[in-house]
Amino acid sequence: MLFTLSRHLLLLVVTCWLTGQGFVHILEAAEDKPFPGRSFSPWQDTFAFCNETVWNYKDGKVVSDAGDDAHRKDSPGAKGESYSRRCFVMSRATMQFWKFARFDASQKRVSEEEYRRIIRRIARVTVWRDTLPASDRIVVPGFTNLRTFSTAYGELLRANLGEGWPTYFRPGNFALPFRPSAEAQRGIAKELRAQLKKGDPAVLWLANFPSLNINHAVVAYGVKETYDKSGDYTVWIYDPNCDATANGGRPSLLKWNSSASAFSFNKTFYFPGGEVSVRHVFTDSWH
């Protein structure tokens, strides 16, 4: 038995050495992930409501007539309320719930006022702080995840996650007129891939200034690399403008083209698809 175990261990070491992966990486991968100990899930870690658009859209372009074949700016079932210009708010809040909250369905549900206090406590935690261990997280009792919580208390969340207008005064916004260089995009691509491979989601700012066809915040939560060693990869995106569980939970896609040193975002109801400039946001007080 001991001989067999030793032989298997030796085989594993040799295999790691031959593939260039290194035995240390195998040991690191075997360690328990930080709470919640699983990958980000569009079925569990996203909001059940969307950021509404200011305009009506058709085929990725603004239209004045909200006909049957256009995407209306007011989402169905909104009961007359407007929740727009909140893509940065929702992206930031998604990260705060992922990093600082713990849902516990075994505990009894509390009053709406207590949930309001809990939401505000989570929304006030500085988003770029390190992810908290389970014991230090703010508990949301009576629910299994953010999706079920926001299904039951969507209106309360919308009212307490924060206003949209402060987004326009973020210090990092002053970089908008200056399109990132190819070198800067390569740096973002390297940083983003490393972060996602560790299992850490990231908030990204997609823009094309001076074009106004996109100016949007999204959450990147997964990466899939090509097999041709080109350096290209595809990022899975949670888009606050869209229901993350629609179309079977298929994510929006952001693609990195290494040879062009450029990102491209897929076509959506509000964007025709194509190249975008990408910035990593909510990483510190400036960005």
Image: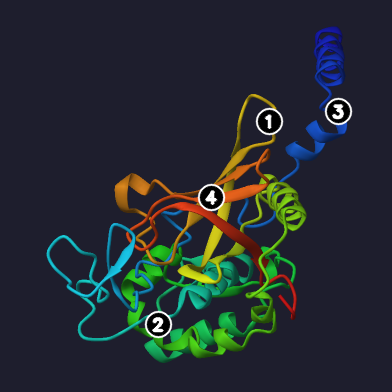
Identify the mark nearer the N-term, 4 or 2.
Answer: 2
Is 83 on the left-hand or right-hand side of 204? left
Q: Which kind of residue does numbered mark 2 sit on?
A: Arg
Disc 2 to disc 3, C-alpha distance: 47 Å
Identify the mark nearer the N-term, 4 or 3.
Answer: 3
Q: Name the residue under label 2.
A: 158
Q: Mark 3 points at which residue?
A: 22
Identify the mark nearer the N-term, 2 or 3.
Answer: 3
Colouring chosen for the image of the structure: rainbow
Q: Is 146 located above or below residue 174 in the figure?
A: above
Residue that appears at 32% across and 64% down: 61
Q: Which structural element holds mark 1? A: loop
Residue that appears at 60% across and 64% down: 203
Identify the mark nearer the N-term, 3 or 1.
Answer: 3
- Taking depth in this image into account, of 231 and 79 the one nearest to the observer is 231
Dots 2, 1 in contact, CB < 8 A: no
Q: Mark 4 points at which residue?
A: 264
Identify the mark nearer the N-term, 1 or 4.
Answer: 1
- Taking depth in this image into account, of 123 and 73 the one nearest to the observer is 73
Disc 4 to disc 2, C-alpha distance: 30 Å
- Position of residue 270 measured from the top left corner of the image (x, y, whole percent): 36, 63
Q: Which structural element holds mark 3? A: loop
Residue that appears at 68% across and 30% down: 230
Disc 2 to disc 1, C-alpha distance: 42 Å
Q: Which kind of residue does numbered mark 3 sit on?
A: Gly
